[in-house]
Amino acid sequence: MKKALSILFRCLIISVAVSLFIFAGVANAQVLRGVVTDVQSGEALAGVSVTVHGRVSQKAATGLDGSFTIEKINFPITIAFTHVGYTEKHITFEAHPEKTIEIKLNPSNLSLKEVAVSSKQGEGTENMARNIERQAMNVMNVMSAKAIELSPDITVANVLQRMSGAVVERNASGEGRYAILRGMDKRFNYTLVNGIKIPSPDNKNRFVPLDIFPAELLERLEVTKSLTANMEADGIGGAIDMVMKDAPAHRLIGANMATGYNFQYFKRDFQSFNYSVINKQSPTEKYGLAYPVKMKDFTDANLALRAQTALPGLNAGFSYGDRLFKKQLGVILAGSFQNNYRGNHNDLYGSVGSDQVQSITRRYFSEQQSRMGFHAKFDYNPNKHHKLVWYNAYMRFNEAQVRDAESRTSQTTRLRWNQQQILNSTLKGLHQLADKHLQLDWSAVYSKALNETPDNTQVNVTVVNGLYRIAQDVGALRRWEHNSDEDKAGYLNLKYTIDAGNGQMELSTGGLYRDKIRNSYFNEYTFRPFDERKPEATQRELIKGIDWNNYDEIRFEVKEFGNISDPLNYDASEKITAGYLQSKYVHKHLQLLAGLRAEHTKQGYFLKFPTEGARNTGEQNYTDILPSAHLKYEVNKHTNLRASYVKAINRPSFFEIVPYQIISEDYKERGNPDIQHTVAYNYDLRYEYYPRPAEQLMLGAFYKKIINPIEFSMVTGFGQDTYYMPLNFGNAYNLGVELDILKYFNWFGIKANYTYTHSRITTTKKDEMPNPDVSASNKYITINVEQSRPLYGQAGHVVNFSLLFKDVRHGWDGQLAYSYTGERILIVSPYYNRDSWLAGFSQLDASVEKKLGKHMGAFIKASNLLNSPTIQYVKPNRQNELLQNVKRYKGGVVERYNYYGQNVILGIRYKFY
């Protein structure tokens, strides 16, 4: 018994001692907090494994902001930091650090010397994007390749809508196509690839459709909002620069493959036709102007309409990059292919008939989109003073579209295939001379844009008492269109750096010359139903179900000659000569960039089929002197203040100066060879705060005074006729405020921007007023009135808000993105108070990515989750406020509802580096 008590007592003493030791240890245990970054770029590294030696249970992983926390730490300890692509690092702490520690990891493929001189490692990251914004002398916004990859978007146009101040104009399938920056229509912006302006495939205008570019080919997307003197001046709204992937510092291989579906095809069939048999040339192109066309000159194989279940989409991409021959030769090859099935269901609301029922035309679009992009870039560095770069890109976008429209009295079906192509080849040299004080760079550029829409066919059917007859006056129209835009350009820039007292000064000069040749072709043929096999009285009565079931079975006759004299048959030329002087002065925290640019424009046109008495050729010549100034003050290492002034221009489109005439149902439209180019004075202020390398808070304001803005308006003249034509309208203004926020926390982040824009322009319109002569037969007379309104396309409010999520331990990344674009004018009416507006539009998108090992990952991208409709309507006015039995929106009258359906893409991604 005593022995047992003795053992029990000893155990109790030992237990108490152990407990006291443990308690003391816990009492002394502390929390270790830190941040892990890339030693070269300063980027916060997410997903770094942080492990305490000898204590397997004590570990953590860094979050989106690179931070980590380990609790119950007893010092001294040794901690290991490991991350894919980086050299493992071990650090011993003898005591608890007084503040949050910062750990810098070296990329595993680079020596410390290489880390110091290489800038490639950080390209494509959020840190690099913020650093570019921070270091730039002008106002700009940048989206990195990493942000693009994790976004729900697959085209550049849709990516752009996430950036502050940007609104996209959508195509028929609801995808973004053209950019509107800061409320300035697409005509006021220009598009660059690697800093080089590219031509447009549009047959009338200069602006470039951004949906032709796959987003995965980009290193980053830059939107410049205040131009410098070494930039082309025709960007009142700004410039969009697609910086393509560059050769990496080490070998990199990437590939992805995905499939997807549009949800609207769960409810209806996808309609298609055989576009591969289309004749690319019209009969007139083949056989000459004097040739009278016959039905045998046209194929009907492309008119057979097919309805079937839509196939899943297919998207794939590949990239290879490396540095060869002792790192002297850099190579990047990348390609992307996207084939997706999109569509649109819209309802067009017309007038109220005698039965007091509003007419509705229901239209269904089925569209196969095939997008292909390739780019190859080679850079050769023979030594540290010289570098040669050769860049080549080819983009192609095909659309095969069926539009089926039906009302109570008619049915029309359009079968259209369109192909757009852009080719660019740029050879560039960069040279350091005179002991690095003098720098020279030059570029030789060839670019070409092509657009073709061969045999664009529309079949017209009348519906009477349930019978579908081919319309007898115009049973079908078949149209051939194609155009090209070719640029040959040269750029030269010189920069000399000198010490100036306590500061530094850069003096630069340079210029460009561009020779543009553009041609446009248009030919349309009219067909009437005619079946010679039927009795003469009914040869034009072709009824569905009796005489035909599909469009390739309809028998037509064709007018012998098409309308080859259409004004869209024209050639255009443009020669731009420009030079600039620019000086940058740096003194401590203050930087000033001032410059003067001169641009001479020689723009002309030539009608291929001239008409008597018309101005069949024309030319405009003018020179602009364009000053600019940019001031940046670094309040501290985290904060900048900016102010900018820029004078910029906007040239008329190629077709606007052609003296064309088009007769529409309500009015005549014509071009204006005497229209003048637009000049604008642009002012910017911005406050920038960068709390961490990848985070930002920016608040800016802008004001634009616009002289001679180009807008369409009604003009009475040219005899007794009234025309709707482009004119210059005195002065307009545009002002606004922009807010950008990007903040990361441990496992989630917030990315948001808001833009408020307000503009005004005054134009002449037609209005109806009561006739003062009460005895007259006409109760109303038409007069010209002035109306002030916002600029076309300008939305008052634009909001983007994204929640970013990251679960490092399980390898998950996610993003939930909401965007809102306020109401804006969609169509400027020639009549007072009858402009068509696009209602405010909300969109919710999402993306999720999951790591599947070291090199693999799976992803889901979903867009338009709310299936929000776009609503086109006319605001309340005297003409529509008393209408009965019409569909209304906010008191106005609805013209159109569009529904595009949800899109989901699922894929896998592979990266080896």
Image (cartoon, rainbow, N blue to C red):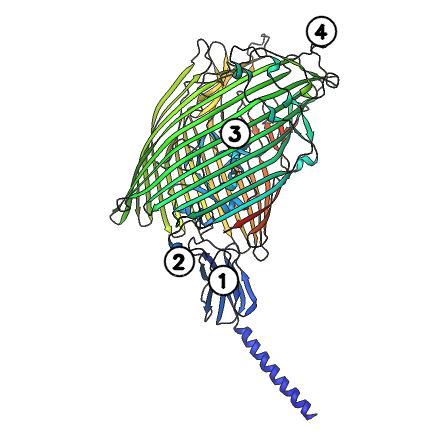
Tag in front: 1 or 4: 4
Tag in front: 3 or 1: 3
Q: How far apart are marks 3 and 1 (CA)?
A: 50 Å
- Provide the residue designation for mark 1: 81
- Provide the residue designation for mark 2: 112
Q: What residue type is labelled 3?
A: Gln
Is 598 in front, or is 511? 511
Residue 420 circle label? 3
Residue 709 versus residue 102 in the image, above or below: above
Q: Can residue 780 be seen in this view?
A: yes
Q: Residues within 10 Å of mark 1 (few under 14, many from 20)?
A: many
- Provide the residue designation for mark 4: 536
Residue 770 circle label? none
Q: How many marks?
A: 4
| Lower position in the chain sequence, tag 3 or tag 4 | 3
In the rendered image, residue 727, in percent from the top left (x then y), is placed at 45, 21
Please give the name of the residue rendered at 36% of the width and 45% of the height, measured from the top-left corner: 381
Q: How crowded is mark 3: few (under 14 residues within 10 Å), some or many (20 or more)?
A: many
| Lower position in the chain sequence, tag 1 or tag 2 | 1
Q: How far apart are marks 1 and 4 (CA)?
A: 90 Å
